[in-house]
Amino acid sequence: MTAHTLDELLAEGVRGRHVLVRSDLNVPLDGSTVTDDGRVRASLPVIAKLAEAGARVIVMAHLGRPKGIPDEKYSLRPAVDRLAELAGFPVRLANDVVGPSAQELAAALGDGEVLVLENVRFDARETSKVDAERQEFARELADLTGQNGAYVDDAFGAVHRKHASVYDIASLLPSYLGELVRAEVEVLRRLTEGAERPYVVVLGGSKVSDKLAVIDNLIGKADRLLVGGGMLFTFLAAQGHEVGSSLLEADQIGTVQDYLERATAAGTEFVLPTDVVVASKFAADADHEVASADAIEGTAFAEAGIGLDIGPETAAAFAKEIAAAKTVFWNGPMGVFEFPAFAAGTKAVAQALADATTAGALTVVGGGDSAAAVRTLGFADSQFGHISTGGGASLEYLEGKELPGLTALGA
Ligand code: ADP
Ligand code: MG
């Protein structure tokens, strides 16, 4: 990695300089309550280090997907309040991104003070496909730093985006790689370059189509691919089973069949569920029963049955595969863990990863919902080798794609 690092910036000296930091404060919210502050915690060290060194810190971040206009629902306020609480020093939030409030507060920053700009996606130019629009926005962001500014990219969760605050800004200011991004890339590199075997990948979550590219890339690299979550039903359908009213991406069945065929020859074994928890409806209090994977429509709910979790036999089989692994990457909950009745599969996999960590395996959890799941199910971050702050970014890295945010920094 030839990119300049945060340590190099600190060695140059930052006292009195405005430093723009791209952080990932994209936390899950319930109203205005942060339900998982993992990304805020992960972002704090770099912000605090810069502040302690006397920098005038301006943080850029996004939250959710506002449509390029200010929208109170997507304000960074809850994340910023949590950041200030964890930091133990005041953190101000501008009312806009590059408007009068941001300009005034940025100019007024004292050494060691921290300002957060409002959600960068309140400005449509942030995500524009038109280079000139993004560059114009990046210029306005860079201008907030006055003379002698610098840019630090610490938002791993956004490095796969060609956005103004991630990509274009790096060509306008001296740029440095934050420690969070560096640490993430280091771990992911261990998964892609000579992972210790057996290398087991556990995939779940809601959409097969989101994960197909990574499956494609992992065939021939991983020893075993364990499939749970909503996507398992497309796999079962590809094997010719009925799946009732479960999540099914019928247009992906052919692709999945092709993967199943290719895998054996490539030395990768798919491990598919043998049983699932079938519910009467998509609800926390739905009636449910365990069904064999080839008899989902044989429950009391017949064709109306919806698979909401892997079954106990599958959970035990997955745990056994994970226990035998030296390297484990997990993305995507095994079931609708948000409903306690359907969280057992996810909990079993999390426990298996935690045990594997203790036994000396490298365990990596990637994905926003997966990270939230392990925390809400009562696991500590320290029970895993690494919890990635970036779901999409970690998957794209494993897909072997070029990540614009890293390219822009020469990483
Ligand atoms: P991540 O953010 O970790 O990458 P995803 O966003 O792909 O994960 O998927 C997370 C979502 O998948 C969760 O909200 C969970 O409820 C949902 N999910 C898991 N299993 C099922 C299922 N069987 N049916 C419907 N949704 C599911
Ligand atoms: Mg998700």
Image (cartoon, rainbow, N blue to C red):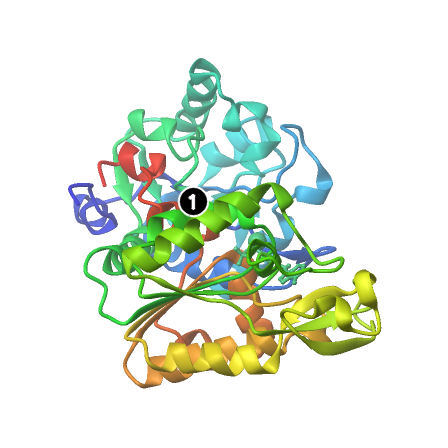
Q: Quadrant of the N terminus?
A: top left
* Residue closest to the eye, 199 or 108: 199
* Element at label 1: helix
Q: Position of residue 306 (x, y in %)?
A: 75, 63
Q: Does 160 sit left or right of 170 as displayed?
A: right
- Give the mark count: 1
Name the residue at the top extreme.
Answer: 132
Decide: is 102 above or below 262.
above
- Depth order, front residue of 356/77: 356
Q: Quadrant of the C terminus?
A: top left
Determine the image quadrant of residue 361: bottom left
Across and down, in percent, residue 124 comes to: 58, 25
Residue at coordinates 54% horizontally, 79% vertically from top-left? 315
Residue at numbered disc 1: 213
> Image check: 400 left or right of 393?
left
Q: Is residue 89 above or below residue 106?
A: below
Q: In this view, which residue lies farthest toward the front?
A: 240
Indicate left or right for 15 with 122 as reference: left
Residue 25 appears in the figure: yes
At label 1, which amino acid type do we have? Ala
For residue 335, what is the image quadrant?
Answer: bottom right
